[in-house]
Image (tube, helix red, strand yellow):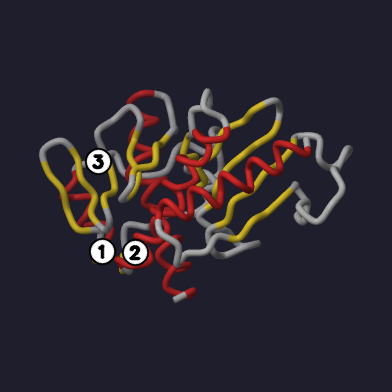
Amino acid sequence: MTESIVATRRQLHGIAESFIAGPQYRTTGTIRLAVRSDGFTGTAVPIAVHGTRLEWTDGGVALAGPVSRIVQAAGLDFGPPPEDIYHPVAPLALDSVLDLDAGAAEAVSRSLYAGGAAIKVVLPEGHPVLWPEHFDVAVTDNEVNYGVSAGDDGHPLPYAYVGPWDFAANAPTGPLWNAPFGALHPLDLSADLDGLTADIAEFFGRAKAQL
């Protein structure tokens, strides 16, 4: 299952960059995305991923097969945001072939949505943003980043994190602070949405209390 989640997460990351964030930025000037219970969406354009489908105002298509076919069906200004915004992390080529696992996509979406919900529990004034660069839903409070990542090269499966801006110079002590940037908490992908949300909120709360 791990390999399936990693492969699907990487494809979803590329989809977030090139099918939503890039076209949205070229239209509205923002790369911000938002999590949904079954996927994610643009914040300024009606383009969204629901499960393993890409949907827009008057249509949709399965996220399967050649990227070029999906681009043609959607009619989007395909491609990641420009490199002066950030260097693309998971670029999709037109000749790439998408092969998402539905169960893995659901696990990634559930993790990110639970992260957004947990942020609202612990930081009710916060506004969680799904950032396409790192494919994480996050908020900053008092120079501390709270978020959930879908996974990366350092930790391939979804995890929650807390990263104080000054961690390198003023690192808290204790077992909670187990990562070079702060605290990392692996997620139990067998948990349901409520269980994940509660677990992440408890982790955020413990970290916040120690800062």
Q: Secondary structure at mark 3?
A: loop
For this rendering, which residue is in front, 176 or 72? Answer: 176
> According to the image, label 3 marks what residue?
76
Q: Which mark is residue 96?
A: 2
Q: Is residue 94 left or right of residue 135?
A: left
Classify residue 144 by image quadrant. Answer: top right
Q: Secondary structure at mark 1?
A: strand
For this rendering, which residue is in front, 205 or 30? Answer: 205
**Mark 3 Cα shell of 10 Å, populated few (<14), some (14-19), many (≥20):** some
**Mark 2 Cα shell of 10 Å, populated few (<14), some (14-19), many (≥20):** few
Depicted 161 relative to depicted 44: above or below:
below
Classify residue 172 by image quadrant. Answer: top right
User: Percent from the top left, x then y, of residue 173?
Assistant: 87, 48
Q: Quadrant of the N terminus?
A: bottom left
Q: Secondary structure at mark 2?
A: loop
Considering only order in the chain, which callout, 3 or 2, is on the residue closer to the N terminus? 3
Classify residue 66 by image quadrant. Answer: bottom left
For this rendering, which residue is in front, 32 or 145? Answer: 145
**Marks 2 and 3, how far apart in space?**
16 Å
User: Percent from the top left, x then y, of residue 132?
Assistant: 47, 43
Whether tag 1 and tag 2 are in contact, CB under 8 A, the answer is yes
